[in-house]
Image (cartoon, rainbow, N blue to C red):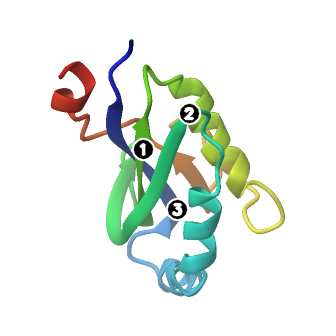
């Protein structure tokens, strides 16, 4: 029997170079659509998992030495066993692809087109739950 696992995956909405008016305007638009983004991320069928988005934060994210303004959503994932990380990251990216977001990446890669959405690698892995 596998132990449950709990971890967080960041989803970065990279909106432009940090110190530009265009980036500020873009982040305003993404924040206005925040409830829709949250709903799409929470609706992702992650196969044997539950997931929820408790928050989002505005921050600077450095990619290839360039600072970008980002609205970063945290997706908390609880699995009923060993997660297929690739499948989880691919599914989160697929939920956001489409007319609203053209440049969506299922993992950090280079080069990327900005504005773009990047599914990051897991953080905050709860070892008590995982290896209990």
Real-space CA distance between mark 3 and mark 1, rounded to the nearest whole angstrom: 19 Å
Image disc number at residue 13: 3
Mark 2 neighbour density, 10 Å: few (under 14) some (14–19) many (20 or more): few
Compared to residue 50, the image places residue 109 above or below, namely: above
The mark closer to the camera, 2 or 1, is 2
Residue wearing tag 1: 77
Along the horizontal axis of the image, is 26 left or right of 91?
left
Tell me residue 88's x, y (percent): 57, 35
Label 2, secondary structure: give it. loop
Q: Residue 132 sits in which quadrant?
A: top left
Residue wearing tag 2: 48
Residue displayed at 19% across by 27% down: 127
Compared to residue 35, the image places residue 66 above or below, namely: above
Tell me residue 115's x, y (percent): 61, 62
Real-space CA distance between mark 2 and mark 1, rounded to the nearest whole angstrom: 10 Å
Labels 2 and 3: the sequence-earlier one: 3
Labels 3 and 1: the sequence-earlier one: 3
Along the horizontal axis of the image, is 4 left or right of 117?
left
Residue displayed at 37% across by 36% down: 122
């Amino acid at each position: 029997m596998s132990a449950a696992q709990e971890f967080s995956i960041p989803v970065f909405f990279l909106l432009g170079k940090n110190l530009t008016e265009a980036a500020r305007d873009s982040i305003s638009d993404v924040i206005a659509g925040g409830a829709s983004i949250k709903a799409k991320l929470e609706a992702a069928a992650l196969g044997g998992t539950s997931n929820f988005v408790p928050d989002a934060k505005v921050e600077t994210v450095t990619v290839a030495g360039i600072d970008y303004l980002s609205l970063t959503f945290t997706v908390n994932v609880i699995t009923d066993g060993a997660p297929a990380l690739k499948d989880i990251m691919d599914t989160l990216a697929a939920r956001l692809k489409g007319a609203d977001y053209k440049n969506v990446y299922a993992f950090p890669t280079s080069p990327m087109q900005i504005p773009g959405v990047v599914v990051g690698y897991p953080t905050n892995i709860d070892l008590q739950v995982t290896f209990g």
